[in-house]
Image (tube, rainbow, N blue to C red):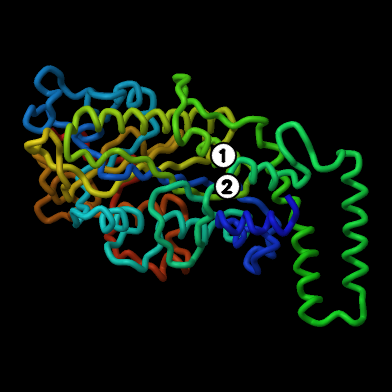
Amino acid sequence: MNRRNFLKTIGAVGLAASLPWASGRAQAASSMHTGKVLLTLHTGGGWDHSSFSDPRNNPLINRWANTRTAGEAGNLLYAPMAENAAFFNKYYSYMLVINGIDIQTNGHDAAARNRNTGNLVEGFPSLNELYAAVAAPNVPMPFVRNGGFDESVGLMPFTLLPDETLLRTLSNPNFYDSTRSYYADSHMGILKRFQEERLQAQMGQQNNTPRWQAKLAELQRAHAGSGDVNTLGSVLPATLDSKDLAGQSRGGIRELHMFLTLAAAGMTATSSFGTGGFDTHGNHDANHANALVNTTRLLDYLWTKAESMGIADRLIVHVTSDVGRTPEYNAGNGKDHWSLGSDIVMMKNAPWANRIAGISGPVHEKRAINPDTLQLSETGVQLQPRHVQSELRKLLGIDSHALAQRYDLKAEPMALFNPAVSSGITV
């Protein structure tokens, strides 16, 4: 692939604006991201909290309650369906379960916007976009995306997760395919030396126009910053995974491996991922079980692979959705949209994990809580996405940044990440 076609390709997938030679914003890139890595997993369609992290031993709400009771893992409660038991028992020490979130709408788009930005109306950045803009504005791909919430306010537009072949070309411009290179490795040093000598000679021409001279200077900066991108080659494996930990081929595994590779190379700080199947207006139990198995296996792979790559200690995962689901079944054995839901935040060795924050009523009614104790309070605050987003900003250390202040969510402080308090299991 020649340079012109390569640039066309990266432009088509949204990479061009994120790479050092194509953006004035990135011209100063000289260091890679070594801080916390944020991944948002958006479970599209609206996961049913009763079938996952906020279950009820009530057959009218959960059919499994005719023969089983909700399970407990650490201080958490889970629905005994799909592969929830294995997931909660393995990861309860990583998990903060946030229940009783008033989503404020029954519509998919508005709910997704609220849960990803903290605001129902357009014009506020997602947590991913804000974190990328604050924590890693000068790395090659600050914010990569593979589904999930896709609105942007222009602070840090996302880059679509690149194709594997393109990723290998980024890590090694001499890459042709898995068995061949364009040039012999022994020739690459000579080619680079002559390339640089030619560029210096061109920049020294007395009759260069200002525009041409600026372009040459831009190319020189790209050459100087290419070492940042080349670090990808040190962590990019010969093949990317495509199977989950049970050995089954699963969509999303290859992309998660690719994201972790980019994060390990310091080339990105955050990503949004999407998985679906949760809009179960019919045949709820079977369809939701399939979607939950897919979600928990993706998360299990993510944490296991991050551990093996040495970056699990840097990873923060926010598992969210759009709408919730009704506490009763409809005539088609499905569940319809509901304006109450749950989130999960995961981090290894988190002092605030193995806790429940937020409360919903016996049939998932909205309940106000004391923001300091997280206990029921008639004079308390109804937990909303703006509170979750505001506290996540604090967790990531970006809440006092000027950009975060510009997009102030006006949320009361909420002790979501205070390990000393908890809502506990209340039903």
The quarter of the displayed image where residue 45 is located:
top left
Q: Badge 1 local density, few (<14 within 10 Å), some, or many (20+)?
A: many
Q: Is residue 303 left or right of residue 185?
A: left
In front of the other: 334 or 425: 334
CB within 8 Å, label 1 to label 2: yes
Q: Amino acid at mark 1?
A: Met
- Residue 3 disc label: none
Q: Position of residue 325 (x, y in %)?
A: 18, 42
Q: Position of residue 261 (x, y in %)?
A: 60, 39
Where is mark 2, residue-wise? 162
In front of the other: 277 or 403: 277
Q: Position of residue 264 (x, y in %)?
A: 61, 40
What's the distance in space between the residues labelled 1 and 2, CA to CA?
9 Å
Q: Is residue 22 above or below residue 179?
A: below
Q: Residue at x 49, y 66 (%)?
A: 155
Q: Is residue 226 left or right of residue 90?
A: right
Query: For numbered disc 1, what is the local secondary structure?
Result: helix
Where is mark 1, residue-wise? 258
